[in-house]
Image: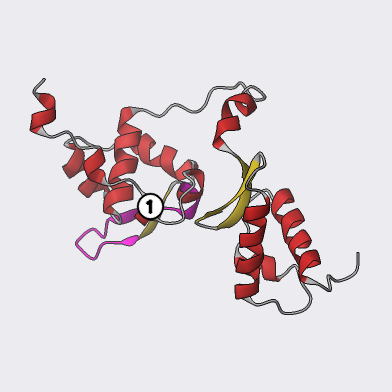
């Protein structure tokens, strides 16, 4: 195929690139698909059209933190899970609590996490979150000892289908009030 000449051909190039890419594509990535300069506004318009084109299909075009990707609609997840029946990774309560603290309070130090949780943070917990690429060291706090500051990664957002941390559910949704505990 020669260089796409019209807008429909450009949309098809975007579609095939998004369908075949193993990771989300940013607008910068998509601009590289074309020899001629294509404006970001034009890309966004084409992405909106693709999203509409796929509205009644089994896949959907979604925007996540690192770009755009096609993914199966959530109602098909139980069927697709049968293809790979291996169990999903189970995370301990300590891992999930630590991840939640980092996500909602970032950037935080290990000491901040320990103060909130009330217990020492097992090094394996931090290692597990870093190996999963959900958490990374983003700097050091300017205090004696210069402890590492931890924050979530774009991969964390992608795995949760979020564009930004602002899309996290409100923390109040998880906190039980005294009234809720009195049954």
Graded by Cα atoms within 10 Å as few (under 14), some (14 to 19) or many (20 or more), the crowding at tag 1 reads few
Where is 88 relative to 110, above or below? above
Compared to residue 86, the image places residue 175 above or below, namely below
Quadrant housing residue 143? bottom left
Tell me the SS state at disc 1: helix
Q: Which residue in the rendered view is the most extreme toward the right?
A: 1
Q: Is residue 73 magenta?
A: no
Q: Quadrant of the C terminus?
A: top left
145 horizontally vs 135: left or right: left
Front residue of 121/104: it is 104
Residue located 29% across and 50% down the image: 104
Question: In percent of the image, x 61 and y 21: which residue is there?
Answer: 85
Residue 168 percent coordinates (x, y): 35, 48
- Give coordinates of residue 180: x percent, y percent: 13, 29
Instruction: Look at the image and name its color scheme.
Output: secondary structure
Nearer to us in this view, 156 or 133: 156
Q: Verify whether residue 141 appears in magenta.
A: yes
Of residues 62 and 141, the one nearer the viewer is 62
Residue at image x 84%, y 74%?
Answer: 5
Q: Quadrant of the N terminus?
A: bottom right
Please count the marks in the image: 1
Q: Left or right: 159 with respect to 68?
A: left
Q: Quadrant of residue 18?
A: bottom right
Q: Quadrant of residue 37?
A: bottom right
Residue at the spot of label 1: 167
Which residue reaches farthest bottom? 37
Residue 142 percent coordinates (x, y): 23, 66
Q: Which residues fall within the magenta stretch?
A: 139-156
């Amino acid at each position: 195929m020669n260089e796409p000449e019209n807008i429909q051909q450009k949309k098809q190039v975007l579609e095939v690139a998004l369908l075949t890419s193993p990771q989300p594509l940013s607008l910068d990535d998509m601009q590289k698909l074309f020899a001629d300069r294509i404006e970001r506004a034009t890309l966004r318009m084409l992405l909106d059209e693709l999203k509409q084109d796929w509205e009644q299909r089994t896949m959907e075009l979604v925007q996540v933190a690192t770009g755009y990707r096609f993914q199966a609609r959530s109602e098909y997840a139980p069927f697709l899970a049968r293809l790979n029946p291996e169990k999903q990774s189970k995370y301990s309560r300590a891992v999930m609590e630590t991840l939640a603290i980092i996500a909602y309070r970032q950037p935080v130090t290990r000491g901040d996490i320990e103060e909130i949780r009330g217990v020492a943070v097992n090094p394996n917990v931090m290692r597990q979150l870093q190996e999963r690429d959900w958490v990374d060291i983003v700097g050091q706090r300017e205090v004696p000892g210069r402890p590492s500051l931890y924050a979530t990664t774009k991969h964390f957002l992608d795995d949760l289908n979020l564009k930004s941390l602002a899309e996290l559910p409100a923390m109040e949704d998880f906190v039980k009030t005294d009234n809720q505990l009195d049954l």
